[in-house]
Every structure is written in structure tokens, then in C-alpha cells.
Image (cartoon, helix red, strand yellow):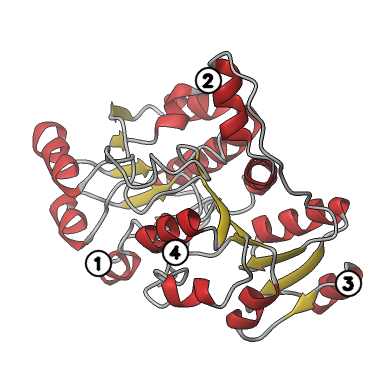
Amino acid sequence: MKILLTTTSFQDTPGKHQELLNRAGFEIVRARGPLSEPQMLDILAQHGPFDGLLNGDDQLNAKVIDAFLPQLKVIAKYGIGLDSIDVQHATQRKIPVLFTPGVNETAVAEHTIGLMIAVAKHFWFHFDTVKKGHWNRQTGKELWSKTLGVVGSGRIAREVVKRCLAFDMNIVVYGHYWETDFLQKYNISHVREISELFARSDVISLHTALTETNRGMINKASIAGMKDGVIIINTARGALVVEQDIVDACKSGKIYGYGADVLEFEPIRSPHIFQTVDNILLTPHVGSRTFESVQRQGVRAAANLVNFLKGRSDYIQANKF
């Protein structure tokens, strides 16, 4: 069987995940993702057909999925976000989409906290000025006692909440799957309308999957309903925000700062409107990339792929049919 492996952190980090995949005996074609539709089709033309994909955030739309048929048997996502895959179309074509929940929440939660502190204390400005031999300083903000609004209710969101309680932050959450016991244990306020969360929060942290319903939910109108000087952190998906509206609000001071590990289109297309705004801090979608989490996520993704193709039952499928 032939496999297309495109996720870079899987390839760049040695460990048990690579050993597991190599021992399976598959022919492996390696590429450096995330790959666009034309790049996926070009690899297929040069090296296909493929029985399975072990992919990151490559564009697997209906056209790409159909092109890989009839040989393609399975899509194994290295990660949990499935918005780059047309899951509905894969389901119609009876192609299982496998994924890796429960492996990277610690890494992403820690990255989220890092971005919060970096934005609040002007880390980018201070790093830059000292490296250039200057001693310019800006006064920052404390996170202590501020109100944190968390959008989303998955594992990462819960881990962020638990860590922010150490800052004595007041927690407001929005999402459908917050357990009553968890809310009561940590004295968390659960709001039914996201506009209420926006209005109450000093810091907003996004931890929700991207859908057509919430695409661009942080925009000029929703920002207007937020507190002056709000901090926004996004380690979920870049398209949850309207990037131009973020720039405008950061320049005006309405947003104190925006810290993100994601962009609407990745990798960054330079020049980008975020690049010249000092209170916008960016990292290259690296929040889940730690030596520990790469092995957890890689082992699960490789096991999903290998077990499915070898007829074993130990795999996690996102699209039941």
C-alpha cells in the first residue's frame, strides 16, 4: 500500500510515531504541507495513486478527494481540526476521516497562556527594542482579577480555564458542552449569548472549531460590543476573525492586542496586513508542537492509519457512516 505523508511536525520530530509508521511496511511518499489543491493534485499525478493520507492542514476539498479515488481508502488527520477537509463529501464517498482527539490540549493551553502574557506585557516590543540595543519600555497589564471569556467547550478550552484560575481570573464561557459539575467546581459563569461574553470580558480566548456559522465572528460589529482595551487570543482557526477588522481595532486602541497562532491562510502570505502592527503577535501554528504532544498526536494518527488499513479496530473516526 502507498501512503502520502504531508504533516511537517510528524516528519521533523523523531520518535515512536515514525517507528510505528515505518514498521507497517507501506510505501511512503513524503511532502511538506500544508498543501493547496493544485499541489495535492500535482503530487497525485506524479506519485499516485494512494491508499491513505496522513495529513495536516492540507486542502482536501471535494475535487481533491474525488481525484484520489477510487484507490483512496482513508484520510488520517494528524490533529483534531477538520475544517480543511470536506468531511461531508468524504462521508458521501464512504471515505473514513480519522482524527486524534485528546492528545494536544496541554500544549495548546500552555501556548495560549504564553500569548496572553506576551500581549499583556508587550513582549514583542520589548524583545525587539532590547535586541536592537535600546532600553525603551512600555507599561503592560496584569491578568490578575481580569475577566476571561472562553469561546468553545472542548478539552483545550477546559485546560485554559484551569490554568487561568491560577491568575485569579473571573471566567465566563460560551459553548454547548460545558458540564454543570465543571462549571460549579470552578465557579464559572456560562452565558447563552456570545454577545454577553464579548461585553463582559477583558480577555477573549478562542477555542472553537471553524464552521460557516462562526466564520468571521470577530468582526467590526462584534468588536464594537467589547470593552475598550480588550485582549483577543486565537489558537483555534484564523478565519474566526476578520483580519482587517482586527488590524483597524488594534491600531485604534479598541483592541489592546491580538495574539494568534493561526491565520486565515497558512502559511503566511507576505506582505500581510498583520506584519506592521506591533500589538499583533503571531506564531506559525506551532501551539500543539512540543516534543511530548507530537509523539502523542503522531502515535495516535499513525495508529489510526495503520490499524484501519490492516483491518484492526483501534482507530478514531470522525465521520460515522
> Which quadrant would the C terminus be assigned to in this image?
bottom left
Q: Earlier in the sequence, mark 1 or mark 2?
A: 2
Residue that lies at the very extreme toward the top in this rendered image:
133
Decide if residue 170 is on the left or right side of residue 139: right
Residue appearing at x 45%, y 48% in the figure: 262
Kindly identify the residue that appears in the image at 43 percent across and 26 percent down.
Answer: 11
Estimate the x, y position of residue 42 in percent, counting from the top left.
11, 38
Q: Amino acid at mark 1?
A: Arg
Q: Mark 1 sits on what residue?
A: 93
Residue 221 on image: x %, y %: 45, 77
- Tell us which disc is closer to us: 4 or 1: 4
Between residue 187 and residue 119, name the one nearer to us.
119
Q: CA distance from mark 1 to mark 2?
A: 34 Å
Local secondary structure at mark 1: loop
Q: Earlier in the sequence, mark 4 or mark 3?
A: 3
Residue for badge 3: 187
Q: Is residue 70 left or right of residue 319?
A: left
Q: Which residue lies under the disc numbered 2?
A: 14
Q: Is residue 73 visible?
A: yes
**In terms of secondary structure, where does tag 2 sit?**
loop
Circle nearer the viewer, 4 or 2:
4
